[in-house]
Amino acid sequence: MNANDHLAVECIDVHREFQDGSRIIRVLQGTNLSVKKGEFVAIVGASGSGKTTLLNLIGGLDTPTSGRIFVDGLEITNLDDEGISAIRRHKVGMMFQDQYLLPIFTALENVEVPMLLDNIPTTKRREKAIELLSLVGIDHRAQHMPHELSGGMRSRVALARALANSPAVLLCDEPTGDLDHVIGGEIIMLMKRLAKENNRAIIVVTHDPEVAKMTDKILLLRDGILVEELVADFFKPSGVDIEVAREKFKAEEEGTAPQE
Ligand SMILES: Nc1ncnc2c1ncn2[C@@H]1O[C@H](COP(=O)(O)OP(=O)(O)O)[C@@H](O)[C@H]1O
Ligand SMILES: [Mg+2]
């Protein structure tokens, strides 16, 4: 067990390598991450830096080459298949950009699927699905098929589905990728509320500065490790050297700045 019970997610010195023919691709190279319950964290980083790989590891869809991962206080890196699938069913909710809503089912049924597979009785399952659709503001479209919904609406359904098993941790991989800023912003506000009200940890991978700005903390994945990114750096206007500006402010504060 893990001593840090207040942590929803903890990654300790996680490595993930892939074998590509005779070549080894070292993606994660000693990644550490702690996310508290109720915390809303953004992970940013260049394409191919390993963001999806990391979410897959936390979600139990993949196993690290080495290192330890804890979810809601339980170490998942030493569980057997049954243990991992229990974690996936009960502790983690996942939401992806391309959503994978099942096209042959209605919005309501899509939200019901995880509970159906978890053998939750019909009435209880349906009630919960309607409650979740209403929570994300899309209950009026419960009987619509995915193709009858806009991108923003499908994202809401995907969010409701990810919450179906009341997960301690919600993992979102570029959830607003193909949405405009207004709709994307609304969904992120909603997530933020869900994190705070339910003491749930949310990790969102994003390319969108507007999204990252709304979270509690921005982490940058670079060279296989996560570093805390100052919001100011992430939004650095081009041509402005933040380090130079920071040094100048510091020198002024300390009274060592050259006088005019
Ligand atoms: N199953 C896999 N087999 C081989 N290489 C992989 C596999 N999954 C990811 N990779 C490689 O790992 C790197 C990181 O991928 P990914 O986590 O998808 O990055 P990101 O989500 O940050 O764009 C990429 O170079 C990718 O090609
Ligand atoms: Mg990715």
Image (spheres, rainbow, N blue to C red):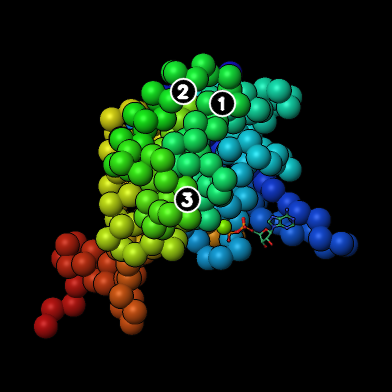
**Nearer the observer, 249 or 133:** 133
Tell me the number on the disc at residue 146.
3
Q: Earlier in the sequence, mark 3 or mark 1?
A: 1
Check disc 3 and report its element: helix, strand or loop.
helix
Query: Is residue 170 visible from the viewing direction of this image?
Result: no
Which residue does the numbered mark 1 point to in the structure image?
116
How many angstroms separate mark 3 from mark 2 (CA)? Answer: 20 Å
* Residue 86 lies in quadrant: top right
**Nearer the observer, 44 or 165:** 165
- Is 152 on the left or on the right of 224, as rendered? left
- Is 78 on the left or on the right of 104, as rendered? right
Which residue does the numbered mark 2 point to in the structure image?
125
Q: Earlier in the sequence, mark 3 or mark 2?
A: 2
- Answer whether labels 3 and 2 touch (C-beta < 8 Å): no
Query: Is residue 163 visible from the viewing direction of this image?
Result: yes
- Answer whether labels 1 and 2 touch (C-beta < 8 Å): yes
Looking at the rendered structure, the kind of residue marked 3 is: Pro
Q: What residue is shown at x 19% (from left), y 72% (from top)?
A: 257
| Image quadrant containing the N terminus | top right
Q: How far across and down, in percent of the image, does residue 39 sit?
A: 36, 37
Q: What residue is shown at x 62% (from left), y 41% (from top)?
A: 57
Q: Earlier in the sequence, mark 1 or mark 2?
A: 1
Q: For mark 1, does the 10 Å Cα neighbourhood hold few (<14), some (14 to 19), or many (20 or more) residues?
A: some
Instruction: Answer above or below: position of 15 versus 87.
Output: below
Check disc 1 and report its element: helix, strand or loop.
helix
- Is 206 on the left or on the right of 2, as rendered? left
Q: How far across and down, in percent of the image, does residue 196 sit?
A: 29, 33
Q: How far across and down, in percent of the image, does residue 151 sit?
A: 41, 58
Q: What residue is shown at x 28% (from left), y 38% (from top)?
A: 193
How many angstroms separate mark 1 from mark 2 (CA)? Answer: 7 Å
Q: For mark 2, does the 10 Å Cα neighbourhood hold few (<14), some (14 to 19), or many (20 or more) residues?
A: many
Q: How far across and down, in percent of the image, does residue 93 sit?
A: 50, 36
